[in-house]
């Protein structure tokens, strides 16, 4: 496994995304470099209370450890006790305008070192991107999914439908029987194309992010909104918080591995709200999000 090539790509991806977002937003991301006492470190680049983004984080981390965290060995118990390293770029953008969706993207690589001489290290890649709208627009959902499809197609026709279904199942609040958003693609424990092929697939996902998201920003950034739309956005952000704290494997891994809490939790929205047993009125755009957009469907049809 060429850890240097992976790290160089991830750092360049972070830099490119941040530079492009600064052009769109007009603000500047704070650069926070940190080290981890147990091994490794990272660069957190965060923006808050800017023109476009109420909060955005584009985070690089490269961390190491002597024993695999429980969340990383759930599907690979034979690796328990192995030393390891993990690196990745993860981003979450929470726009101010409720008509612009929240978006998440992550690409990462994990290596478990061989326990004995003569054995090989075990590596795998993971990642994906998903969209969490507050108001549904079919053209936005179709564009996002089409971009994901086109990024994966050169690597195999089977990957978009497989990863799309995986995303629908993963970003799902089981305790509410409700999707977090309209999905995208998600994959984990991926090494079936060998190192070079699997790394190329990961790069295809990371490189597709700006093309998937920025056209949606352009279409929605100047739409007028008021208190009603912001109130609904805050309510739906509560679901985002619930997923991250209850179900998200990345959050769990970060906390279990002694990661930097400030960076792990900067994916949270700056504000959120909850109401007891509340549903939006029927025949409203808010109700349409729940009935027409959150249930899994084929957005390429």
Image (tube, helix red, strand yellow):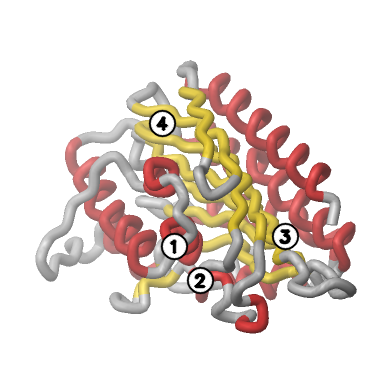
Residue 239 lies, in percent from the top left, at 30, 60
Q: Which residue is mark 1?
A: 256
Q: Which residue is mark 2?
A: 71
Q: Residue visible at 52% across and 67% down? A: 69
> Where's the N terminus, which quadrant?
bottom right
Cα–Cα gap, marks 3 and 2: 29 Å
Cα–Cα gap, marks 3 and 4: 27 Å
> Where's the C terminus, which quadrant?
bottom right
Residue 5 picture quarter:
top right
Q: Secondary structure at mark 2?
A: helix
| Residue 158 appearing in the image | yes
Q: Residue visible at 24% across and 42% down? A: 271
Labelled disc at residue 53: 4
Badge 1 or badge 2: first in the primary sequence: 2
Query: Looking at the image, is 248 positioned above or below residue 37?
Result: below
CB contact under 8 Å: marks 1 and 2: yes
Badge 3 or badge 4: first in the primary sequence: 4
Q: Secondary structure at mark 3?
A: helix
Question: In the image, which is nearer the foreground, mark 1 or mark 3?
Answer: 1
Badge 1 or badge 4: first in the primary sequence: 4
Q: Secondary structure at mark 1?
A: helix
Badge 1 or badge 3: first in the primary sequence: 3
């Amino acid at each position: 496994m060429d850890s240097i090539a992976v790290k160089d790509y991830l750092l360049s991806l972070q830099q490119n995304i941040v530079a492009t977002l600064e052009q769109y937003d007009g603000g500047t991301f704070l650069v926070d470099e940190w080290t981890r006492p147990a091994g490794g470190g990272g660069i957190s680049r965060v923006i808050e209370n800017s023109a476009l983004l109420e909060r955005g984080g584009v985070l690089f981390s490269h961390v190491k450890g002597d024993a695999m965290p429980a969340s990383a060995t759930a599907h690979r118990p034979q690796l328990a006790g192995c030393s390891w390293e993990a690196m990745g770029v993860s981003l979450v953008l929470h726009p101010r305008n409720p008509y612009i969706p929240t978006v998440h993207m992550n690409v990462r690589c994990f290596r478990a070192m061989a326990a004995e001489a003569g054995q090989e290290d075990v590596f795998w890649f993971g990642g994906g991107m998903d969209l969490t709208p507050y108001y549904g627009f079919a053209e936005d959902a179709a564009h996002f999914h089409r971009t994901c499809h086109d990024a994966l197609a050169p690597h195999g026709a089977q990957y978009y439908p497989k990863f799309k279904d995986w995303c629908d199942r993963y970003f799902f609040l089981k305790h509410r029987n409700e999707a977090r958003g309209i999905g995208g693609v998600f994959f984990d424990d991926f090494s079936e194309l060998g190192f070079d092929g699997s790394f190329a697939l990961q790069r295809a996902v990371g490189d597709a992010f700006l093309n998937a998201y920025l056209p949606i920003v352009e279409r929605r950034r100047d739409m007028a909104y008021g208190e009603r739309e912001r109130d609904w956005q805050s309510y739906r952000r509560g679901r985002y918080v619930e997923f991250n704290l209850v179900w998200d494997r990345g959050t769990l891994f970060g906390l279990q591995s002694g990661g930097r809490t400030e960076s792990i939790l900067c994916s949270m929205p700056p504000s959120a709200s909850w109401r007891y047993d509340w549903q939006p009125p029927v025949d409203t755009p808010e109700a349409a999000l729940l009935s027409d957009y959150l249930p899994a469907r084929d957005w390429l049809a």
